[in-house]
Image: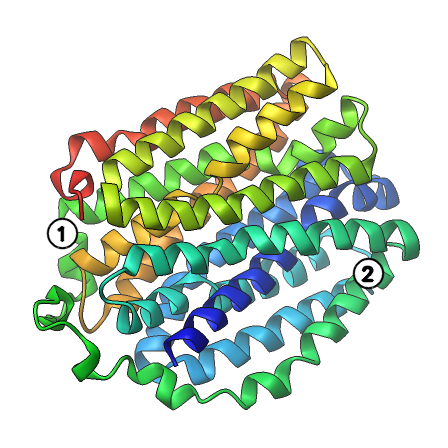
Amino acid sequence: MAALVLFLCFACNMLGRGVGDTFIVFLLPLSDAFGWKRAEVSSVYSIYLVVTGLSAPLTGMLLDRWGPRVVYPAGLVLLGAGCLLAGHLTRLWQFQACIGIVNGMAVSMLGMVPASMLISRWFRDRMSTAMGIAYAGFGTGTLVIVPLAQYLIEAHGWRETYRLMGFVILALLPLFLLIPWRAIAGGAPRASRKDSDPLDETRAWPLKSAMSTRAYWQLAQVFSFTALAMYAMLAQIVAYLVHLGLSPLEAATAFGTAGLLSVLGMMASGWSSDRFGARATATASFVSTFLGIGFLVLLSYHPARWLVIPFVLLFGISQGARGPIVASLTARLFRGPGFATINGTIFASMSIGAALGSWMSGVLFDMTGGYRASFAFSMACVLVAAAPFWTARPLGARR
């Protein structure tokens, strides 16, 4: 049963994040089709990220009250409906509603908030490793679904691509209804847990009490500024690579390759955190991200194609690597009843940071006519995100 739980968490992360991130390759077709400014089109992605974040506490409360049997299928229906409707839209506000709001809620309900709750109940010993595998679904979705969407757009147009995505997603609903949700929600049998497992000594952490601790806000700082750093460049990266001379498919493939490396990076991050501790693992990942963005800056001065390779390697291997670390620290620091709600609010800080970063990238591009300002902003945010691992004792602990 534990293997089924881990597969479910991985697969739903892959589907939700992969479909959500496809907007990156819809950005240019929509801008060309309707004549919208870059910041206007980016606002759809920003709203999606904000709603994903703001929905995380609601997802947590629904999980605490109704369990995954309600949350996961509901998320699937919302995701499919949002994509299906997007193929018929003509106004910016309609995209903001369907892709921004509806899909944002859906990705939250299919994402790491329910996954973290389930993993904390089934994987008590190697929690960070299991979190890393679940988080790897994000990168897998980016690798598989984003280039596929780009191919379909080139072959059939953006409207047909959205419709096809919606039909395929909704066709998965019968499979979701057959999953043994009650057994999954119950967690691992007590006999299979170690007597010394600290997570058995559960205590309730009401949200208000958790928010009164320094550790809560430090975890939120890590998530929010990491997201600011990543999405200040991610929202524009495909367009930037096309600007440098790559074809749209080549740019999407580079983006997808970074997603492939993030799969390995997130799994390695979880394993490394269990073995070497959160501080060492997080620091290594932040250094890799910083250097990767540095290569993008260098590309703006010297547009040699080979410089894309070190960017993809460094940025890809560290993309999402902080997620398993923060999720495991949250589960250990705020274990017990109410964890899903607390985790949802911390996760919300990441999505809000992602939305602000995506919006900032569009604003900085419109203001400067280039991408260097976004890259400089990203590098500064990386430093702020890394700070709590060196200034906070709970975040610097080995386990």
Based on the displayed image, in which of its 4 quarters is residue 36 positioned? Answer: top right
> Quadrant location of the N terminus?
bottom left
Please tell me the numbered disc located at residue 212: 1
Residue 310 horizontal/vertical position (percent)? 59, 24
Q: Residue at x 66, y 9 (%)?
A: 301
**Pointers 1 and 2 in contact (C-beta within 8 Å):** no
Residue 325 horizontal/vertical position (percent)? 31, 48
Residue 4 horizontal/vertical position (percent)? 45, 77
* 93 left or right, relative to 381: right
Chain-order first, disc 1 or disc 2: 2
Which amino acid type is marked by label 1? Ser
Which amino acid type is marked by label 2? Thr
Q: Nearer the viewer, residue 140 or 380?
A: 140
Residue of label 2: 161
From this viewpoint, which residue is outermost toward the top? 301
Q: Residue at x 60, y 66 (%)?
A: 102
* 284 left or right, relative to 93: left
Residue 382 vs 102, above or below: the answer is above
Residues under labels 1 and 2: Cα distance?
Answer: 46 Å
Callout in the foreground (1, 2) = 2
Q: Nearer the viewer, residue 41 or 3?
A: 3
Q: Residue at x 71, y 65 (%)?
A: 83
Element under label 2? helix
Residue 287 vs 14, above or below: the answer is above
Disc tally is: 2
